[in-house]
Image (cartoon, helix red, strand yellow):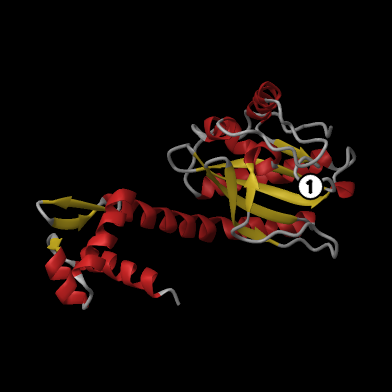
Amino acid sequence: MDKTLVKGITVLEALVAAPEPLGVSELARQLGLTKSNIHRYLQTFTALGYVVGDGGRYSPTLKIWQQGARVIERLDLRRTVRPIMDRLASATLETVHLGISEGASVIYVDKAEGGHSVRAFSEIGERAPTHCSATGKIFLAFHPTAMRDTLAVSLRRYTPRTITDPEALVTAIEDVRRTGVAVNSGEWEAAVGGVAAPVWGPNNQIVAAMGLTLPLDRFTDDNAASLIEYVQSAAADASRALGASVDFNAAPRVFEIA
């Protein structure tokens, strides 16, 4: 266990538990740490925006609450959506992912395994690049800052099919916005494909993307329309369960595989 990290977290927890701001001397006495250590931790937390100082006394900021609120949102999201993910995995026999946006990446916060013996490997907590994953493209189309964050860095080429030209990506995302569905045809991993749709929250803002991930040889023109319809239907069910009221019939349900 990292003792330095433990001490720093102890300082932060003491500030959160205190009914009023605390000074360096008070924290040192309470925690049995040196004043120099306390001061160093406070300076770090202040620089990170978790603590604010006023007249030599320190208190936590709302950033701590914001981070906790994000965790609660994820837990509520997973608990609500998981039964729908299980039904989608059962109906398609493919692996289902639930992703949330973070900068130029998507983080998989939950998954339901498909029934096929051969399936794409993934882990909860894994990050996927937004520009070449189906779930990522959903956020580029509907999240207010995902496209900006993605275009702020170079578009890495993962396979010959990866879109690395910003203008081409913008054009592709316009199609996603128009159809309401995103497809990945071997753009992140050459032999893996995917399809995803947006999950909306009670304020009709995108809160997640739900998608299937499968070997590319099982994602063909013969079954693409069916898989896409399954995903869009499941994402719409998830959105309704979360209290959204968008028009789920507004976007076409047919999308050709490139």
**Observer-nearest residue: 168 or 228?**
168
The answer to whether residue 4 is above or below residue 100 is below
The answer to whether residue 234 is above or below residue 36 is above
**Relative to 21, is 103 on the left or the right?**
right
**Residue identified by numbered label 1:** 189
Is residue 183 at all visible to an observer of this figure?
yes
Question: How far across and how far down the image is residue 129, in percent?
Answer: 64, 43
Residue ID at (78%, 54%): 92
Question: How far across and how far down the image is residue 5, in percent?
Answer: 38, 69
The answer to whether residue 140 is above or below residue 123 is above
Question: Which of the image's four quarters has the C terminus?
Answer: top right
**Observer-nearest residue: 194 or 250?**
194
Residue ID at (63%, 40%): 130
Residue ID at (56%, 31%): 147
Question: How far across and how far down the image is residue 237, in percent?
Answer: 60, 47
Q: Amino acid at mark 1?
A: Glu
Residue ID at (88%, 41%): 220
Question: Which of the image's four quarters has the N terminus?
Answer: bottom left
Question: How far across and how far down the image is residue 181, in percent?
Answer: 68, 35
Q: In the current view of this chain or complex, which residue is farthest to the front?
A: 36
